[in-house]
Amino acid sequence: MPDHEKRVLLREKDLPKAWYNLLADFPEPLPPPIHPATKQPIDPRDLERIFAAELVRQEISSDRWIEIPEEVRRIYAIWRPTPLVRARNLEKALGTPARIYFKDESHSPPGSHKPNTAVAQAYYNKIEGIRCLSTETGAGQWGSSLAFACSFFGMECKVFMVKVSYHQKPYRRSMMHVWGASVWPSPSPETDCGRAILERDPECPGSLGIAISEAVEVALKSDDTHYTLGSVLNHVMLHQSVIGLEAEQQMKEAGDFPDVVIGCVGGGSNFAGLAFPFLRHKIAGKDIRFIAVEPKACPSLTRGEYRYDFGDTSMLTPLLKMHTLGHSFVPPGIHAGGLRYHGMAPMVSFAAKLGLIEATALYQRECFEAALTFARTEGVIPAPETSHAVRGAIIEALKCKETGEEKCILFNFSGHGICDLGSYDRYFAGELTDFELPQDNIRKALAELPQIG
């Protein structure tokens, strides 16, 4: 890559024609979802009550490649392929010999990586005759992405937004309304689950687990409504692989290859999207480090246990083998709302168990500081979630400064922070505090987990 160039751009014809499925290359089988009543592996047909049949097929598929429908690729082309950017200004500011690249997923209309799966999920539900999709959202990136996708297919969209984020991120709500979605602060009086929680705790700030319960309940009560999830599940990891597949092509054009791959993690989708296509090279013997960066306030990978747990607070979902803080866990209202989930994607959790990836947890203030450094050198304002990946990349680049190693660092810039400027205002006002989850909170939540052999 010539010294004067920063961006590697692919053409529309270079859009991947198939998603990559890491399940085909794991050295061991992924533990299956368990039915909570029978404690046996769940019959995939049971999942078709709330998911599109094709998505259920993808959820359990071990095919290495799954074709991307032409209609999905047509909508992807509104913003994809996204740029790979050499962060030369950041490198200079840090005085590091490291080469830093970021895959810029902020170019989608909602401003994040989330439409990569939202469009696919809306498409498969539409062709199966589903009229409405229900979902949860934390910071609003997923909710706005699903609203965007539903608008293309003429579908109704119902979003339960974690209450603390509902008030912190008003412009994400506005985006959802622009694309025609209905949005409720969760817990809400719209569902049995929400009413029960509000009766116990009228001031409950909400959690992704609670919002999932509300969205699943809505789907279960209506024959023309399906539930969609923006992270965690295998088919979501699959759809996000377009990020890493494009990045592979772009790194080749740049004449480079990553030594370190980094992404922030809440449920795991943006990290998986970038990392999983490269992870197959590590499995084949290539020396690459993969670093998943999470908040200290919600440290499922670094301090949770690898166990079977429910994906939601009301225990409506199947049991998933994952790193978890416990389904009853209600996280503090940090500004990285998309990283406040109690569990981690089973595939990401399994990769950690196998020693293929490593995890680190960071405070929110150091991540905001890193975001400012990035914005003042590279120009783009990171979302609070994305700032964790930025900080992770800076940490690795500064290590190279100490050792003199000229490593190639690649991270996923999962979304911009234009709808999160209120968080930056609070940072400048000194109102953001660092929070490290007390072990007692984790212990209490984990005590409620089901015992599965």
Image (cartoon, grey):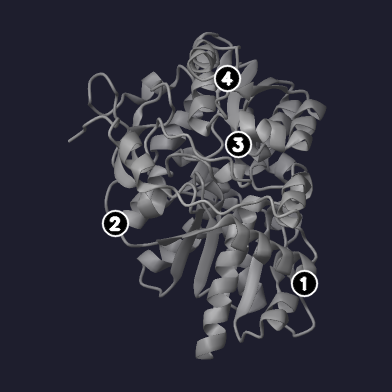
Q: What kind of residue is marked 1? A: Thr
Which residue is under mark 2? 27
Q: CA distance from mark 2 to mark 4?
A: 34 Å
Asked if 327 appears above or below 261 in the picture, the reply is above
Q: Secondary structure at mark 4?
A: loop
Q: Is residue 47 left or right of residue 277?
A: left
Q: Nearer the viewer, residue 430 or 35?
A: 430
Which residue is under mark 4? 128
Please identify, in this view, whether the residue under mark 1 or under mark 2 is nearer the observer: 1
Q: How many residues crowd mark 2 within 10 Å: few (<14), some (14–19), many (20+)?
A: few
Q: Position of residue 105 (x, y in %)?
A: 69, 54
The answer to whether any part of residue 169 appears in the image is yes
Q: Residue at x 62, y 79 (%)?
A: 99
Q: Nearer the viewer, residue 434 or 18?
A: 434
Q: What kind of residue is marked 4? A: Glu
Q: What kind of residue is marked 2? A: Pro
Q: Position of residue 277 (x, y in %)?
A: 49, 59
Q: Is residue 84 left or right of residue 307?
A: right
Which residue is under mark 1? 377
Q: Secondary structure at mark 2?
A: loop
Q: Residue at x 62, y 84 (%)?
A: 96
Mark positioned earlier in the residue sequence (4 or 1): 4
Please identify, in this view, whether the residue under mark 4 or under mark 3 is nearer the observer: 3
- Which part of the image, by quadrant, shows the C terminus? top left
Q: Position of residue 381 (x, y in %)?
A: 76, 58
Mark positioned earlier in the residue sequence (1 or 3): 3
Which residue is under mark 3? 138
